[in-house]
Each structure stands twice: as structure tokens, then as C-alpha cells.
Amino acid sequence: MAAVATPNVFSGSRNEYRVCPVTTLKVDAAAERLIIWNAVTAIVALTLGGTYALLIGLTRWPDVHLLSAPWFYRLLTAHGMNMLVFWMVFFEAAGLYFGACILLNARLVGVKLAWVAYALMLVGAVMVNYIILAGEADVMFSAYPPLEASPLFYIGYILFAVGAILVCCIFIATILVAKKERRYEGSMPLAVFGLLTAAIIALFTLASGAIALIPTLLWRLGIIPAMDPGFYRVTFWGFGHSAQQVNLSAMIAIWYSIATLTVGAKPVNEKLSRFAFVFYILFINLGSMHHLLVDPGLASVTKFFNTSYAMYLAVLGSLIHAYSIPAAIESAMRAKGYNKGLFGWLLNAPWKEPGFVSLILSMAIFGFIGGPTGVVLGAGQLNLLAHNTWRITGHFHATVVGGTTLAFMGFTYYVIPLVFRRPLFAKPIVIWQPWVYGIGVATMSIAMTLAGTFGAPRRHWDVTFTNAIIPVQLPSLMNLFLTLAGIGTLLAVTGGIMYVVICVGSLFMPKREARSLSPLEA
Amino acid sequence: MAIFTPERNWWKPLGREEKLWVGIAAVWCVFMFFMLFGWYYLGTQNLPTVARRITTAQYKTLADAFVTKYKVGEEGATKVPVVDPKGDPEIYLVAQKWQWTPILILESGKKYNLHVSSIDVQHGFSLQPININLQILPGYDFIVEFTPTTKGEYSLICNEFCSIGHHLMTGRITVK
Ligand code: HEM
Ligand SMILES: [Cu+2]
Ligand SMILES: [Cu+2]
């Protein structure tokens, strides 16, 4: 390992670097430690969330109906928080440090502050988990007032968000300093540009979250008399939905990265891809309004403007990426001589590379299931037929679970050899992991969507309404899809377990420098 | 090379295929934009648009008066009132942990203003099997103008989590 010491212009201390033998990138040791800690914490959150996923998934399978009602709602709250918030954001924090420091050959600015941010996020996450399991916060991750959770729940949520804001600021500062110190030539790489998009969206997203959660905390502490539920919903979804665009931008940055790592793809037109990211910053937050389409108190024009005009420009951004990434892969493969027929390039693609399989499945699940269902649900009249049914849950398990999470999983297989500097554990199963997980999630998403079409409500313990005063019978066809979702759950959870086993096992492999870009050979 | 800095002059015009794709996508997006308003005029089942602020106490008073005036029976262990508004178009539905009250008997082909609001936490109005769903908030009187067209029994369930008995929350609307 070649360690190079360079003077730190600001604090007078010295930053330590090593040079990666495979990529020749310079790696700041401080950033590397932060990447490792944030990524490991993310995987812990995923493990917790995945355990709960199995339990709630089996509860919604009518023939199994595993948990009692209180534990179902409790663990559903914990599943939402650990997955959507903690797993995603810890992993993104690792991704931001990776992008700003390693890809830009730069040094991390504000190392101490980065650890403060990590500590805030960790304390917040532990508090939230504790208070949910203690039964003091059965409110779901959305925590709509006047439903009451313990003040500690909101405090944990807010601490976590403050930590995340700090991470974004450190990321942006690191890029600015890198530019000033001329750590990289010309423009920043596209992947970093995508991450910067994510960080910018994250900043206004988290601000909106603060506007929702801080008054709610004050209300729970008795400092303000009431919290308006309509106001909360507007500001909460300004956070909750836009946060999905952070996940989206980060995922696309990772798609481009994996395409480069696996087939050496080069963006066909840098300008176009960058414009597509800019569309997200400008327009996508307005899409938040689609959570409120059937709410009282908002004018139709507000709903229509925000969900149509602006959102379709964001959709245009996605359509551009949907073209650019496959096109980049195709050109790269053709340049290598795989020119036979229309799809020879695809047949000869590296299907033995776990990253490549994750990329393709993630793009397919997001692009063919997640995106289209989302656009459909964003139309007013259709939302009237779908709001809060299991169609919604089906939609976002195709976006953030089949799309983002799978992309993050695939990326991990590169991070482990290159950043953790440990060979992958259980190499023979690595290639199967994205298939098992991806097919499981896709099955589950489609089944949830169909069950919702027959009225299956989301966040619901008993669709037979056994103890209700007025009996209700939902269409029996719904049960078929509930069962199918249960089968999807088993597959998806198996894929999740494979991922966790590979990651945790790798942590105990002997440390050694990567020898190749391909994680199976490194 | 998305993870490396791009070549110096990356500000390049689009290629032919890219122009075609972006063109088609843009046209589609613009079409979708106009259609969102188009469907509003073409469709017969649109989002309800009227709502007013009200305190939960005020709403309860209005709804109680409505129930007292038109009550025709009771149903179930907790004696959920059954109400036939006999031609009065202003009808009230209360969302409360964990019951939709009252059971409504409506006439097919008649226009109603259905008031729905919650007197505790948020609930999800979900009318089955036609799968019509609305978010119900306390403090907002949601006024849904509609005309029932098909006779039969419709079940109401709750599809917004409203604490631990959420799955017990049901109700009914009968159209005769
Ligand atoms: C093994 C994979 C997974 C399975 C089997 C699974 C299963 C489920 C199930 C059964 C529900 C309950 C739906 C309901 O009753 O309404 C649910 C909700 C949810 N899941 Fe997952 N899930 C998985 C992974 C994930 C991941 C990776 C994420 C996020 C990145 C995620 C985010 C959510 C969210 C946000 C909810 C909604 C919670 C709420 O309604 O408050 N899930 N999931
Ligand atoms: Cu309810
Ligand atoms: Cu409910």
C-alpha cells in the first residue's frame, strides 16, 4: 500500500492517503473510515428492517397471519423507519463521502463534524428503534398528528435529520474545496454530479421535514396547543416524497457508476445526462403533492399543477436516463466488438458479474413497475381508486426496494473489495443474490398492486374484519394476491439474508488489496 | 466513464437517436400534461373539491343532530345508528376510532352532499367494492358531491392507520 501524506491547508494536520492499486484513485483514510462505519450501520438497519419485513409479510399472508395486531403495527412502524430512513440514508452518507473524496481524489473537509453527524444519526436511529419497540410510538413512519407518539420518537427523528443535513453540507464543502485545490481536472464526474443533485434535494427536503416535525414535537411537549393535520401532511410529504428523489438521484448515480465499473460504459452525452439531473432538482419536489390528491382543503389547481406539469418534466428526466444508461452499455459493448445482431451486445454482457445483474434488474424493476405505477397513481381520478390501498405499497416496493435497494446492494460488491479491502465472502452465492431478491421483490410488488386493486388496504392487520361490528367481505380474488405477496416476501427475504450474510461474512475475511475491478476476482 | 472526470469539451450537441428519443419523450410528457386536465373534463368521477374548516366539536354536533333527526334503526353490538335521510341532500358521516357512523341508506339517482370528517385522528374513507378512497382529517369538513347510480350494499373500511383497532373500523352505505 502506498501511503502519501499531503499537508492539510486548513488545520495544519496531515491527511493520510493510499492509492488504490486497481483504479489508481487516491483514497483519503479519514473518508474511508467514515464510509465503512456508515455502510456497516446501514446494513445493520437493513437487517433489522428485513427481520421485521419477514414478520409483517407473513402476517399479511392470510393463511399464516403470524403476529398479533399490536406487534404488527409496531413492527410495521419499525420496518418503515429502518428501511426507508435509516438503511437508505446511512448508505447514502457512505455514498456521498465516497463520491466527494474518492472519485474527486479529494480530502474530506470537516472530519470531526462528519463524526458528529454520524453520532447524531446513530443516536437518533437508536432512540427511534427503542421507543417503537417499547410500544410508545405505534404511529407508522409518517406519524400523522393527532396520532400521538412519545416525544422521544420525534426527537430521534429530528436528531437523525440534523445529522443528515450535516452530511450534505460536508459533502458540498468537500467538493468546493476540491475544486479550489484543483484536486480534479475540468468538470466533476457524472456520478458525483448525480450525488450532488441528491444532496441539494436532500437539503430542502430535510428543511421541509423539520417544518413538519419540530412543531409536532412542540405540540407533544404541550408547548403549542394543536398541530394542524393538513399543514403537517403538506410539509411532511415535502420531506417524505422529496426524500424519494434523493434516493432516486443517488440510485441513478450508482447505475451510471456500476455501468462504468462492469462494462466500462461512458455516458453517451454528458450534457443530456446532466440536464436530466437538473430536471429533478427543479421539478420533482412538486410531485410531493400526489400524496395529497384526495385530501380535503387543497384546491384542484394546486393538485393538478403540482402533479402534472412539473412532475412530467421530472418524468422526462427519468426517461432520459432510461435511454442514456442502456445506450451507454450498448456502445461500450459494441466498442468491444460484440456487434452481432440487434441484441448481441446484451447477450454477451457480463451476466456473471453481480453488479451488472443488480444494475439490470434494478433498472427493469424500477423502470417497468415502479415508475409507471407511480405516474398512474399521480393522476387524480386514478388516485381516488388507489389511495392508501396496497397498490401504493406495491408501487414503492418496486421503486425503493426493487430499484434503489437493489442498486445499493450491487454497488456494495464493489465497495467491499475496493474500500473495505476484503475479498467477498461466499463468492458462489453472490451471483444469485440479485436474482433471488429481485424476483422476490418484483413478485411482491405486482401482487400488492393487484391486491390493492381489489381493495386491500395498506397498514392493515385483518382484511377479513372478523371482529368488526359491521361485517365486511372483500372480493375473494384478493386473497390469491395476498398469498402471492407472501410467497414474494419469502423470496425477497431470502435474497436479503444472502446479501447480509455476504456483507457480514466479508467483514471477517482477511484484509488484502483488491486485485481486480471484478468483485469475484478481487 | 461516469466515475471519472469527463473530457474537456463535453458540451456536445445531441446525436440523431438521442434527439428522436428526447423528442418523443417530451411530446409524450406534454400530452400527459394536457390529458391530466382533459380527463377532468372527459371523466365523470372527479376528485371532490369542497372542504371547510370546522372544529371536531362543531362537526359532532351537526352529525348528531342529523342522526337524531333521521334515525330509523340500530345495528350490531354497539347499536350503530342506521339513518335514512329521506330526501335531505346534506348527509353526514363521522369517522371515529373505530367505527364509521351512521349506516346510511341512500336513494339511487339522487344528488347528495356527503360531509365526512373525523372527530379524533386521521382515517381513510374506503368504499368497497368500488374502491373509492379519501383521506379524512379532523378539523376539515370534506364535502363530497355525488350521485349514487347503482343499487346495492357498499362497505366502508378504514385504510389510514388510526391506532391499534384500525382493522376493526367498518361501516356501510346502502343504495336503494
Ligand atoms: C425483503 C424485503 C421486504 C419485504 C418482504 C417487505 C414487506 C413489506 C410489507 C409486508 C409491508 C406492509 C404493508 C402494509 O401492511 O401496508 C411493507 C411496508 C413498507 N416497506 Fe417493506 N418490505 C421489504 C423491504 C423494504 C425496503 C428495502 C424498504 C425501503 C427501502 C421498504 C420500505 C417499506 C415502507 C416505507 C413501508 C410502508 C410502511 C407504512 O405503511 O408505514 N421495505 N413492507
Ligand atoms: Cu380509521
Ligand atoms: Cu384506520
Image (cartoon, rainbow, N blue to C red):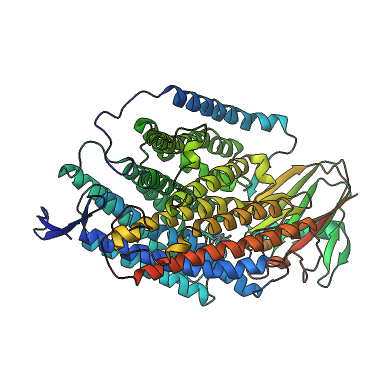
**Please, which residue is most extreme toward the bottom here?**
A134
Tell which of A108 and A186 is nearer to you. A186
Can you see residue A140? Answer: no
Residue A508: x %, y % from top left: 34, 72
Position of the C terminus of chain A by quadrant: bottom left
**Residue B82, quarter of picture:** bottom right
Q: Can you tell me which quadrant of the image ligand 1 is in?
A: bottom right
Tell which of A189 and B102 is nearer to you. A189
Can you see residue A10? Answer: yes
**Residue A504, quarter of picture:** bottom left
Residue at the image point whose x is 25% and y is 37% from the top: A187
How many marks the image carries: the answer is: 0
Residue at the image point whose x is 67% and y is 55% from the top: A447
Direction from residue A369 to residue A85 in the image, left or right: left
Image position of A357 with respect to A416: above or below: above
Residue A32: x %, y % from top left: 26, 60
**Residue B93, quarter of picture:** bottom right
Residue A268: x %, y % from top left: 38, 32
Residue at the image point whose x is 57% and y is 65% from the top: A147
Position of the N terminus of chain A by quadrant: bottom left
Image position of A106 with respect to B38: above or below: below
Residue A8: x %, y % from top left: 11, 55
